[in-house]
Image (cartoon, helix red, strand yellow):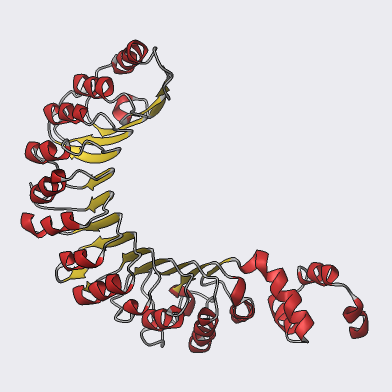
Amino acid sequence: MSSLNIFDLNDDCLDLLLNYLTSEEQILFAQVCKRFREVFIAWGVKHYREFGIDASNTKQSIIGLSTCREVVETLIIDMDHFDTARIFRNYGCDEPVICFNILCYALSGMVNLRRLTVKQLDYVTTPIKKPFEQIFASVKDLNDLKVLEVHAKDDWTFDTLWQLHHLEELQLQIQKIYGEVLVECCKSNPNLRRLQLGYGIVVGNLCDIVRHCANLETLEFGMMETDFAYKPLSRVPRLRQLIHKGARESNSLMPLLKALAVQPQLQQLHIDGGILTPQEILQIVRQRGLLQLKCFCSTAECVEMLAQLIQLQKLSIWVSNGCDISDALLKVIGQCKKLQLLRIASGNLKPDFIYNVSKLLLDLRTDTPQESLHLELPPSNYTKSIEVRS
């Protein structure tokens, strides 16, 4: 077919033709004329709206991404693409600096980008200086960028993170971030609703962010600190979901939980690591509006105390000492009539526990229609998941 005949094709035919071209041919096609470029961009909506860059991508695919940059809404960047330590592999980028510069240029023009994930899950060797800071600088003027997720195994710097101004969700699974940088980031993103931090990554006082988090609803973090180091977090005015992951000192959450109980507002509380003391449980049950709870308990008595949370919809517990918790859980089910999920990661149960749950639900829930209760039991009970319907 001659070039003249190609120009005679309508846009739908050209769109179909693009599917049969290689990445390099597609780039050449887009460079022929303005019309072909517009056809390529229209074709790119379904191919580049959600796009990921990994080690298998070519330079041509990044050029294609740059050409269609205005249609990108979700982008995942795997820094493994720019790794030059390839003794045992034959893939990746041959020109990492050039490819990275093209990427940064493309990022600056992604006016519809809403979600950006930058991840470095393996150690990389690259000539690119401060790659994360360059990426942040490239997207700092994107008003629609609401969600940023960063994973980094190496100890990079993140000093330009505060240049972003429109974030609503921020996740940092990195080696460290200085407290003053995080404070400036919270200050420059007043609409931040969700903040997820890796364990122990904050160098400084995490609580310094509190006065800049007027709209924060979800806070996930983990750190080994003394008990009163946590307490100021209770002053986050709109906090609805609190998640602590990883090791902590015994009873360390007591001051925070006590302060939160003064004006109960939590809807979800996940304490994933560290066994709760009876004193901590006493403060948790003061959160009368709690809808979801995940925690580690030490005794059946502690489990039974959770029956006071009558609004609970989801409960996940782990009991450490091997005691029988069947009766305690039956009391929880009896009192928490809105419970839809009960997940028991560890704990001893009587052989007739499921039968007793079914009987209890029939007695309690016959008057009004209720959703089924989904039970997830530990493997030692030979039943991993079962639904008990009223």
Q: Residue 26: x, y in percent?
A: 73, 78
**287, above or below 342, in the image:** below
Q: Residue 18: x, y in percent?
A: 77, 71
Judge from the rendering whether residue 255 lies leftward or rightward of residue 98; answer left or right. left
Q: Residue 370: x, y in percent?
A: 41, 22
Judge from the rendering whether residue 185 lies leftward or rightward of residue 117; answer left or right. left
Q: 135 or 283, which lies in front? A: 283
**290, above or below 382, in the image:** below
Give the quadrant of residue 212.
bottom left
Q: 274 or 116, which lies in front? A: 116
Judge from the rendering whether residue 166 lies leftward or rightward of residue 289; answer left or right. right
Give the quadrant of residue 390.
top left
Is residue 224 visible to us here?
no
Q: Residue 16: x, y in percent?
A: 81, 67
**164, above or below 45, in the image:** below
Give the quadrant of residue 69.
bottom right
**108, above or below 113, in the image:** below
Instruction: Report the residue at 34% width, 64% height from top.
Output: 192
